[in-house]
Structure formats: structure tokens, C-alpha cells
Amino acid sequence: MSYSASFRCIAGCHGTYPLDQVIYNCPACGQLLEVHHDLDALRDRSGSAWIKLFDQRWMTRDWPHGSGVWGKKEWVQPMLREENIVSAAEGGTNLFWAERYGKSLGLDDIWIKNCGNSHTGSFKDLGMTVLVSTVKQMIEDGKPIRGIACASTGDTSAALAAYCASAAIPSVVLLPKGKVTTAQLVQPLANGALVCALDTDFDGCMDIVQKLSEEEGIYLANSKNSLRLEGQKTVGMEIVQQFDWQVPDWIIIPGGNLGNVAALGAGFDMMYELGVISKRPRICLAQAEKANPLYRAYKQGWDSFEPITAGATEASAIRIGNPVSVHRAIRTLKAFDGIVEQASESELAEASAAADRAGSYTCPHTGVALAALEKLRARGEVEPGQRVVVISTANGLKFTQFKIRYHEDAIAGVESKHPNRPIELPSDFEAVKKSVFQALDQRAS
Ligand SMILES: *Cc1c(COP(=O)(O)O)cnc(C)c1O
Ligand SMILES: [Zn+2]
């Protein structure tokens, strides 16, 4: 069966471009491109036949179909030859039932999709496997590509560097100096990427990498490039699959450059079009108050969008003031009865800490999404009995300083409500015993 996909303008201009062409914008109007699949060809299987096929492949060791992304290859990148797939068994991340945290809000069906339990510790792996595999095929086919470049708030660069290292393709990453965590900085260094730390913010890095990618031989890996979104759209498919193909009521997702929310919607649209699901979830996009251009536009009824200069936030991966995928995101939110919420530094830190106390280990961006959930619950927009999935975008272990600062009550402008510090004691049994029982009594009271 021959399935196919190509780039098209998101504004609907005529023209299609092959996925192995080096092109990021519509030549007619300059808007972004999106990947368009030949849905009629995909209708050769019924919805239930696709479900059966996807379930057969789910989490097996059958390479490459055991990957959460490549188990759905026909819907993602059908024109890729299997020998070019660069995969680290991404996807298939666990769905954590946040039972105690949910109960603290009076809700019993709250789930955290742990996309950070992945090869490089964030959902960026889902998209990067598709992009790097496609570039590998382009190089095999003789295209003059010398390296793949991205601007990053930390996680895109980690994923790009790892997948490029696997494929022996040079990677170039532009980071805002001093604005990514130590873990995120060392990841691309360890994977041998060419790392440039620029004296600017993410938006400044993005401007420069776009110009760099106009030079011959440099391919752009930011989510402006829709190939990434084709991989990222599998997150919604996985969530539905993990619930035996039932659609949750709400999905809450943190957003910065806003590619991921568009990808989430695209995955649901495709399942809907191809008869796998018969309803759509509502989507809530959550932003940090310090980097909230979409929230502002939403509050004004979507009338106008104004880029801002994003301020410092613990949620550093979404510190973006001029999101590349803003139009795609607005389209998605309109189609999914969507809303936008925001979280202050205090709200995101407390929500993250509350989920941790109930057994998670959440990154600050997940904290932003959890704080949004708490607001929706308080407003009655999320009700008991509704199933809510919060997308956890990165692994908490990448954000050690955020956790330490919270528990040392040292986050600027935040008064930690539940700091937890080590009790320092001499090496003395009686002293330890006394402290332990004192602390247990305190907790029981
Ligand atoms: C990239 C990233 C996001 C934001 O995704 P966008 O597509 O830019 O909206 C959120 N959280 C983490 C941890 C990320 O790395
Ligand atoms: Zn166009």
C-alpha cells in the first residue's frame, strides 16, 4: 500500500512540497508549512483495523515498530525507508495515575503523561526521531546537508544532539547563555554537539538560527519545521491508546513556542478523521505568567496577538515571548474548545511541589500545567468524574536547582509553603531516634 505525505501552506495556498525538500515557509505567503497526509489512502484500513495494528506493535521489541512513534509510521512519515530510521525507542511513556494529588483537589481521575521518561528526558525525542531520520535519508539520497541546527531552551538541543550523534550527523545548537539548566547544557556537550552560548534570550537565538539555516548545508531543527510535529502528534494517540482508545475529557499542556499543542491537536484530528475516535477532548494550554503572550491574546478574544519580551521564570523551557507556532496553536485551541491559563512563579512551584509530595517528580513546566488544573477546578470548569490528562513535558531530574531552591525557600519572589530540608545530626543513635520520632509525631498531628 502506498501512503504519502507532503508539505502544504497552513494558510491554504496552492502547492505541495516533498518532505525531503529543504523548505520551511510557504513561497507564496511566507506562512509556516504543515505536513499533509493522503487520508484517502489511509482509509484503506478501518479505524478498528488501525487500532488492531497499533496494539500489535505497542511496546514490543520489534524494531522500529516498538517505538511509540514508529509503531504509527504510516501516520507519521510514510515515505521514510526503514534503514534510515534513527530511533531510541521513544514514546510509550507511562501514564501516572495522580491519585493522591487528584484527591487533594476533590478529583479522582487525574493522570500525568510522563513524556520526560524518555531517551533525553523530554517529549522533544518524539519529534526529533522523525526529523533526524528524514535528514539521514536526504543525506543518503545525495542532498548537500552538512549539519542540523537549532535554537533551544534546553530540551530541543539535548534531543537533537543525541539523535544526531546516533546517526553520525553533525549538530549545531544555539543556547541563551546562562538560561538553561546545568543538566540541559551538559547533554549536548556530552553528545558532541557544536554548542554556541549566545548572550541573548531564546527569541534572540531563534532569529540567528533562522538566518544560519538559510546558508547552504545547514538544516533547521526547530519546531517551525513541521517534521518535528509529526512525531510529537503521537502523544495524543498514545494517551488514547493507553485508555483502551477512550478519549479523556481534558488535556492540559504547557506551551512556549506552541508547536506541541498544535501537534497534540493534529494527532486527535487524524484519529477523528480516520475513525479511531468519535469525539475530541478539550485542551487547556498553560503558560508561565512571565512568558504569557498567548494568554494575553486569549483574554482579548483572540483579536490580536502581540509578541512580548519574556521574563525570567523557573519554567525556563517555555520562556518564549514570540512563539513561532502561534497561528497553528490558535487554530488548534479554537477547534478543541480550548482555553489558555497562566501560572505565577508561586503557583507553579507550589503545584509542582504538591504533586511531588504525592509521588511524582515534576519539572516546573509540569507545575505550570498542574497550577492551571487547580484553577480550572476552582472555577468549576473541571468537575469530579471528568478524566484529565496533564502532559508532563520533561523529567524533573533536569531541574534539580529548581527543586533545591524550593526546599531551601530560595526562589525569588516565592515563599515556599512546604519546604523539606535534611535534619543534620551527629552520628549518635539516641539523637537520631529522638529526631525521627519527633518528626513522625509532627506529621501525624
Ligand atoms: C519544549 C518544551 C515545552 C514547550 O513546547 P512548545 O512546543 O515550545 O510549546 C514545554 N516544556 C518543556 C519541558 C519543553 O522542553
Ligand atoms: Zn501560503
Image: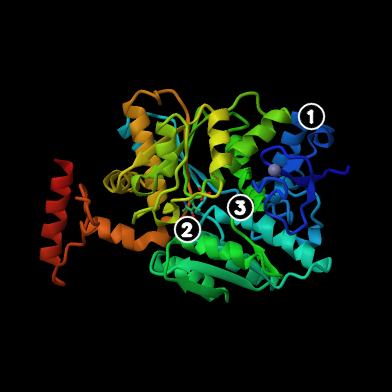
Q: Nearer the viewer, residue 122 or 150?
A: 150
Task: State the residue at coordinates (22%, 59%).
Answer: 410
Task: State the residue at coordinates (54%, 29%).
Answer: 334
Q: What amino acid type is highlighted by mark number 1?
A: Ser
Q: Are marks 2 and 1 in contact (CB under 8 Å)?
A: no
Indicate the secondary structure of the residue bearing disc 1. loop
What residue sits right under mark 1 in the picture? Answer: 46
**Ligand 2 occupies quarter:** top right
- The vertical placement of 250 against 148, above or below, is above
Task: State the residue at coordinates (56%, 46%).
Answer: 325
Which quadrant holds the N terminus? top right
Q: Nearer the viewer, mark 3 or mark 1?
A: 3
Disc 2 and disc 3: Cα gap in Å? 13 Å
What residue sits right under mark 3 in the picture? Answer: 224
Q: Position of residue 77 (x, y in %)?
A: 75, 49
- The vertical placement of 75 against 430, above or below, is above
Residue 168 located left or right of residue 105: right
Tell me the crowding category of disc 3: few under 14, some 14 to 19, or many 20 or more residues within 10 angstroms, Cα based.
many
Which quadrant holds the C terminus? top left
